[in-house]
Image (cartoon, rainbow, N blue to C red):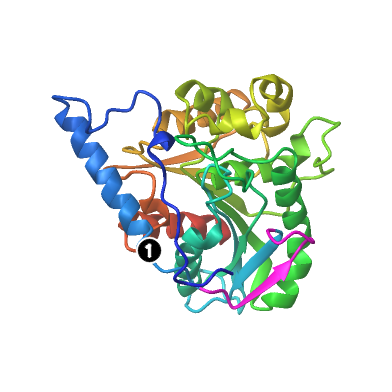
Amino acid sequence: MPEADAPVPRARASERAEGTPTAAEPGNTGGRDAAARAAAEEESVFSHAPVAPDSTAAYGDHPDQVVDFYRPRGAVGSAESSPLAPLVVVLHGGAWRAPYDRRHITPFADFLARRGFAVACVEYRRGSAAPAAPGEDPVAGRWPDTFDDVAAALDALPALAREALPQADARRTVLAGHSAGGHLALWAAARHVLPADAPWRTDRPAALRGVVALAPIADFAVAEKLDVCGGAVRQLLGGEEGFVERQPYADPALLLPTGIATTLVQGRDDLVVPQVVAESYTEAAAKAGEVVGLTLLEEVGHFPLIDPAADACAVVAEEIAQLAW
């Protein structure tokens, strides 16, 4: 893991949804207030130093194919008596772009561990590490590498967790992800409903208690229309040519129903991944005959969901606990 004082990249201005009011628009007091609040939330979440894991294990040969493990260090309330802790598998966000690695979500992983969860924080290959052209964002994601890695990590986790986290109860596994990681969490839980020719398809649902997706990029059609994260969805699927062909293999809104308990947690004031993206996914689920929970938090933007200093983070931990037990 990088040193604790290594610089952590910030979300770029282009990661806001197209058409979102900004402070630069004259006479837009509400937009200025929203932008100022979003900037303060971003500053807060990135002010925490990365937290080193208790151990790290590889699930492949690439440097990014690793999982960090955090031992439970607190008590999780439950009506059941069990000496083992629920296992939370965390997938970080960052628009699937190379500069945004798991460091920024390690304080959230530590927060969950201090609340009694065993935590596995997954790293995966993201976009090209080559410098972006001046004024442009780095390319988002790698096809098919990003999906290869998430599938491989989830397949390897039961054995890795038995070795690294003997305190974990794999029967109480909850998959959680933030932003682009929320997309990956929803996708990983839907591998059994992928098209028959998908290399990541499984023959049965994952052994999960549930999924908690935090401000997820959950509906690619809506995200593309809004230009979420500066066209990251389009880049993830290989550009205009790949979007239509690859969308059925990657878009959670097209991979329903899953039969796995799922909750989305979304800030109403999110300027990065707007509320409508989560709402569109839950509507798609309902049309497929599945009920997906949607917890909307007032006066909350994109980053408080993974910020240990924010009240929203405690709400997220409670949502995870509800599914874990």
Residue 146 lies in quadrant:
top right
SS majority, magenta: loop
Provide residue 87's location: percent of width, then percent of height: 61, 65
Left or right: 114 in relation to 102:
left
For the point 70% across and 24% down, which residue is it? 242
Instruction: Return the residue nearer the eye: 184 or 2.
Output: 2
For the point 36% across and 52% down, which residue is it? 304
Reply yes or no: does residue 60 show up in magenta. yes
Residue 14 higher or lower than 164, as above or below: above
For the point 51% across and 71% down, which residue is it? 113
Provide residue 285's location: percent of width, then percent of height: 58, 30
Q: Residue under label 1, please give it.
A: 308
Quadrant for the N terminus in the image: bottom right
The stretch in magenta equals: 52-64
Residue 10 higher or lower than 157, as above or below: above
Is residue 133 visible to us here?
Answer: yes
